[in-house]
Image: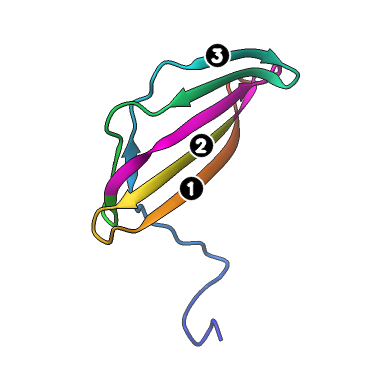
Amino acid sequence: MYRQLDINLREPRSQLLYEIAMPLEPAHDLGLGPNGHRRIFREGQAPRLAGPRLKGIVLPGGGDWTVARPDGSARLDVRITLRCARTMMRWSTRITMAYCMRPPA
């Protein structure tokens, strides 16, 4: 069926939907825990999203939860609710990623 539609499932395709400009308030430092140093960042004034496919605003109540681990890696958990300007559609998104803050020794 996919060959009939000329779709190659092995070749992923992506396109930019939007970018978010979100100023952040100073971090709420929760200190060291068993998994690392925890901080919470809340969005600042008037965060917006804009791109070739979507435009809108970021609704209040979201934030970034970070854990900086002793090995130099970190975990970032972003939770936001977006409202699209054109269709008044709302949706929430949660993005979790881990990254290395310094190169391994």
Going by the numbered disc 3, the residue's amino acid type is Asp
Which of 65 and 71 lies nearest the eye of the viewer? Answer: 65
- The reply, left or right, for residue 50 in relation to residue 8 is left
Q: Contact, CB < 8 Å: mark 1 with mark 2?
A: yes
Residue 90 x %, y %? 38, 54
Question: Which numbered disc covers residue 78?
Answer: 2
Q: Which range is magenta?
A: 56-75
- CA–CA distance in space, label 1 to label 3: 24 Å
Q: Is residue 45 above or below residue 26?
A: below
Q: Quadrant of the N terminus?
A: bottom right
Q: Judge from the rendering whether residue 83 lies leftward or rightward of residue 67; answer left or right.
A: left
State the image quarter where residue 29 is shown.
top right
Q: Which residue is mark 1?
A: 93
Give the residue number, with chain letter if any, for mark 3: 29
Q: CA distance from mark 1 to mark 2?
A: 8 Å
Q: Residue at x 36, y 41 (%)?
A: 59
Mark 1: few/some/many CA within 10 Å (<14, 14-19, 20+): few
Q: Position of residue 36 (x, y in %)?
A: 69, 18
Q: Can you give x and y, in whole percent of width and height, for residue 86 in the image?
A: 23, 59
User: Residue lying furthest right in this view?
Assistant: 34
Q: Does the magenta stretch mainly form a helix, a strand or a loop?
A: strand
Front tag of 2 and 3: 3
Task: From the viewer's perspective, tell me whether residue 81 is left or right of residue 71.
Answer: left
